[in-house]
Amino acid sequence: MKYVAIACIAAMLAYCGYLTLLYVGQDGMVFPGRVANPARVEEIRHYYPRLEPFAVTAADGATLRGYYLPRERDGRLQPAVLYFSGNAEEQTGFFLWSPNELRAYTVAGVDYRGYGGSDGKPSEAAVKADALAVYDALLAKLGPDGRIVVMGRSLGSGVAAYVAANRPVAGIILITPYDSLAAVGQAAHRFAPVRLLMKHPFDVAPDAARITAPALFLVAGDDHLIPPARAEALAGLWPGPKTYEVIAAATHNNILDSPRYWQIIREFLKGCLGSSLPAAAPEAASGAAS
């Protein structure tokens, strides 16, 4: 009996240690941070000569930094796509290739706190508040009649949903989305009370219930990081018009490589923003981006 008691105590201590590691390490798992490569910054500036720095001052004084690429037609700014990154991305990764796929639209994105050149330490509350400030700053650039489609990938899909629930948007694009990060974490750690431990649960359901703008769900059929079941759960809660597309053989990370990826996104944008927008001429050297 003595050895059984010792084994039980050891198992309990090991389990408590496991829970402690999950709790202490979750900030780094949700927000690992990413520093921009200066060479890549210069590369995107070379590809897109009209690219501008986009700095936004948060409510607490932190400076958030990203990029803004205006596109015009007949002297008028085109509607904008505002991008919110995944948790392992910073905005140069998006701007390296995406503006060339979105030639008819203004493109903007700002890094989360602790990512790229942005100040501060990220948290769910801070990232969501910052996202509203970024939206407001972009609308100020576009003018009062400006139209914005918010686009979020992975972690950023929850951020985009928060913006769409609190600001008028022309549409929302959700790439490899989830109904809550707590649900994703619970599936990955079945024997831990993840929902009790999570400091950044990113519960998207309350925001989804308030969104009436058209939504595109773009799901990787072979996604093991955020399983398609999480996107299905969110789509089931979504009250507004939605398009649900699955790229069958894609994974969480390579969905962007599918030829269908940008085709689906451009078709959705035409539906949100009108099909009369012509494809703009590519910027100098933009064809080199991939």
Image (cartoon, helix red, strand yellow):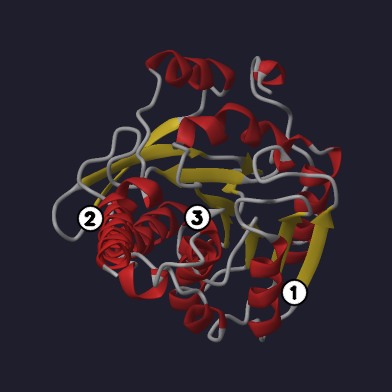
**Is residue 145 shown above or below 113?**
below
The residue that appears at 53% across and 15% down in the rendered structure is 46
**Of the image marks 2 and 3, the number of the one nearer the N terminus:** 2
**Is residue 187 shown above or below 66?**
below
**Residue 134 position in % (x across, y down):** 37, 55
Picture quarter with the N terminus: bottom left
**SS for tag 2?**
loop
Callout 3 amino acid: Gly
**SS for tag 1?**
strand
**Residue 147 position in % (x across, y down):** 57, 62
In this figure, which residue is indicated by the disc labeled 3? 156
In this figure, which residue is indicated by the disc labeled 2? 58
Between residue 129 and residue 286, name the one nearer to us.
129
The residue that appears at 28% across and 46% down in the rendered structure is 113
Which mark is nearer the camera, 2 or 3?
3
Circle 3 crowding by C-alpha within 10 Å: few under 14, some 14–19, many from 20: many
State the separation of the CA atoms marked 1 and 3. Answer: 18 Å
In this figure, which residue is indicated by the disc labeled 1? 242
**Are the two marked residues, 2 and 3, in contact with CB atoms closer than 8 angstroms?**
no
State the separation of the CA atoms marked 2 and 1. Answer: 32 Å
**SS for tag 3?**
helix
The residue that appears at 49% across and 79% down in the rendered structure is 207
Circle 2 crowding by C-alpha within 10 Å: few under 14, some 14–19, many from 20: many
**Is residue 206 shown above or below 249?**
below
Which mark is nearer the camera, 1 or 3?
3
**Residue 82 position in % (x across, y down):** 52, 52
